[in-house]
Structures are given as C-alpha cells and as structure tokens.
Amino acid sequence: MAFGPILPRSFYCRSAPDVARELLGKVLVHGRAAGIIVESEAYLGAGDQAAHSARGVTPRTGVIFGPPGHAYVYFIYGMYECLNLVCEPAGTAGCVLIRALEPVAGLDLMRSRRPAARKDEEIASGPAKLTLALGITRAHNGADVTRGKLVVREALRPVSFEIEATPRIGISQAAELPLRFLIRGNRFVSGKR
C-alpha cells in the first residue's frame, strides 16, 4: 500500500496538543505494518502531573527533552509497551501518546501478533495493542521517526473528519484535561469515551 511523504521534524517542533490533533489521519508505519492514527493524547511538560517528564530529566525520560520527532517507548504494568512521539523544541518536554490505529497494511502480520483480537477493530484499539500489532518495543525508544522503519507519513488520499476532544483516560492525575483527541465516529478508537 502506498502512503504520502514522511512527516518532517518541523511537524513535531510544536506544542503537544497541536501535534496530537494533527496526527489524526496520518499513517504510523513500522516495516510492513501500518495504521491510520485515529486517537492520540497530548502530554505536556513540567506542569502536567500525568506526564512522565513532570519530575524532570531522568534516564527514562531523557528522550522527551531531546529533539522532536523521536519515539519515546515505555513499559507499563510490567507487561506492555506504549509509543509516544516527542514534540516541542529540544529542551522542552512534550509528547503525544498514540492511543489507537485503524489498520491499513500488513493485516495478516498484525493479526498474528494480536491473536486475542476477535475482529479487526480490536487489533490496535489501545496503546498497548497497537505496539504489539506493529511490533514496536522499547528497542525503538529514541528512534528517529523522520527516517527509518518506524515513521509517520501523510495519507496518500486524506479524508475529512471531525475531531473530538475528551479528557484523558487511564491516568489518575490531571485526567480532566481535554487532551485526548479522536476521529469522531471512528470504530477503531479505544473503548472508553
């Protein structure tokens, strides 16, 4: 399947909420597997208590403070990995959690990686599900998403859609902020509204 050009670093060198909104409809590609980003969540810098970067630079969070356009992949619940894309200028923390994808390429491969998914809508309908489906691991932490095998591309034929903003989910602090963005009515978004 053909896609448009890879998003340049300048796309990510902006505020996390702007990047989160504009990632919707773009295509996350890892090797032969790809999906349209249908849900994202912005995490801000030092003032955002839900952000891993809230406590400053650590060995774990250093990539978030680095140059934009890199992957921040972290381990959660002792069993899952989640993908964030670093944004904001270098030195300023900010990233976007990719929450759900609509699979568009490599479906057989994605299905084999997600045997628990009973239907295509469940293959990548959550942050841990999509990393499993695309084969993204902590080995990709720090990867430059403007080149290589893990990239975000423009859709070849973009379609129009409405964006819905909701409070973030799956967190306990600063959850009320309307920083979760999704394509309204898309059946591939994660289950909670």
Image (spheres, rainbow, N blue to C red):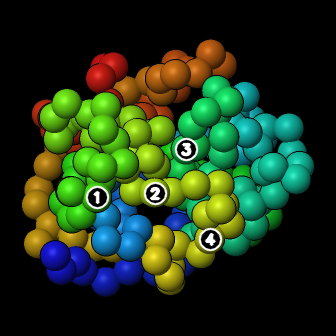
* x 55%, y 44%: residue: 82
Q: Is residue 163 visible?
A: no
The x and y percentages for residue 91 are 79, 64
What distance separates the C-alpha of mark 2 from that of mark 3?
11 Å
- The residue where tag 3 is placed is 82
- Residue kind at label 4, given as amino acid type: Ala
**Mark 4 and 2 residues: CB-CB less than 8 Å, in contact?**
no
Nearest the eye: 11 or 114:
114
Determine whether label 1 and label 2 are within 8 Å by CB.
yes
Which residue is at a point 52% across and 73% down the rendered structure image?
Answer: 145
- Disc 1, disc 3: CB below 8 Å? no
Residue receiving disc 4: 143
Question: Can you give x and y, in whole percent of width and height, for residue 169 in the image?
Answer: 47, 23
Q: Nearer the viewer, mark 4 or mark 2?
A: 2
Question: Which of the two discs, 4 and 3, labels the residue nearer the N terminus?
Answer: 3
Residue 71 x %, y %: 59, 62
* CA distance separating discs 4 and 2: 14 Å
Element type at mark 1: helix
Q: Quadrant of residue 45?
A: top right
From the image, which quarter does the N terminus lie in?
bottom left
Looking at the rendered structure, the kind of residue marked 3 is Cys
Q: Compute the Cα span from label 4 to label 3.
A: 14 Å
Residue at horizontal 30 percent and vertical 38 percent from the top: 115
